[in-house]
Image (cartoon, grey):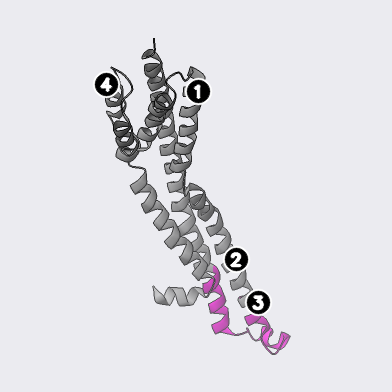
């Protein structure tokens, strides 16, 4: 591996940094986007059951908020009526929508960075290719001008330039393709979570409004 890095030249180092950062982001998103941390299976039903006889106290609301991302949204609905028992339907929906936007931002965290890596890695690989081509042309020109070029240039420098060009192109694609795949996967997963949270919040809002009738 070290020999490959040496053959690829200095342009490989930004690609290595991108690969390390991309791997860290993928691992972090896999851990953070687990269903248990976002939308536990029975959380909505439990929140509705707890509040059948009225809005629960601050301790229950705090416990719900710390449960998951969906719990934060549901706790916002409880707090709206704890702060203002006469809050209107518009106030309740506005608070839930605000909490939903915060939840969306939390779920989408670092996805922009992963998308940037997927876009930048091929360009960094192309940069290495261009640098390798410069090395190749430099080896053909040599110190002796056209005479050296006619003699075939510097074979060692020619081989080094080809190595830089090919290795950087390959590394750029090897980083960009998985990063793009994982970015699309996480985007799809986040969209599913957001849809489920929107439906849950709508059902929860109807439940809370029914308590006032």
Q: Residues within 10 Å of mark 2 (few under 14, many from 20)?
A: some
Q: CA distance from mark 4 to mark 3?
A: 75 Å
Residue 29 spot, x, y in % from top left: 39, 48
* Disc ID at residue 127: 2
Q: CA distance from mark 1 to mark 4?
A: 23 Å
Dot placed on the residue nearer the N-terminal end, 2 or 1:
1
45 on left or right of 104: left
Front residue of 143 and 128: 128
Magenta part of the chain = 136-165
Which residue of the protein is positioned furthest toward the bottom in this rendering? 144
Q: Magenta stretch mostly in which secondary structure?
A: helix
Say above or below: 123 vs 39: below
Q: Quadrant of residue 155?
A: bottom right
Dot placed on the residue nearer the N-terminal end, 3 or 2:
2
The quadrant of the rendering that contains the N terminus is bottom left
Element under label 4?
A: helix
* Disc ID at residue 39: none
């Amino acid at each position: 591996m070290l020999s490959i890095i040496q053959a690829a030249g200095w342009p490989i180092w930004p690609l290595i940094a991108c690969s390390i950062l991309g791997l860290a982001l993928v691992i972090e998103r896999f851990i953070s986007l687990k269903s248990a941390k976002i939308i536990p299976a029975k959380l909505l039903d439990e929140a509705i059951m707890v509040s059948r006889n009225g809005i629960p106290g601050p301790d229950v609301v705090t416990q719900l908020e710390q449960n998951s991302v969906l719990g934060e949204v549901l706790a916002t609905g409880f707090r709206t009526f704890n702060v203002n028992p006469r809050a209107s339907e518009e106030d309740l929906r506005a608070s839930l929508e605000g909490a939903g936007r915060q939840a969306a931002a939390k779920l989408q965290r670092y996805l922009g960075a992963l998308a940037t890596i997927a876009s930048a890695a091929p360009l960094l690989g192309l940069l290495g290719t261009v640098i390798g081509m410069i090395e190749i042309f430099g080896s053909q020109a040599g110190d002796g001008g056209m005479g050296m070029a006619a003699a075939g240039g510097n074979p060692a420098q020619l081989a080094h330039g080809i190595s830089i060009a090919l290795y950087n192109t390959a590394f750029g694609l090897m980083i960009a393709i998985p990063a793009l795949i994982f970015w699309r996967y996480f985007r799809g997963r986040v969209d599913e979570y957001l849809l489920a949270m929107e439906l849950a919040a709508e059902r929860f809002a109807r439940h809370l409004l029914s308590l006032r009738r």
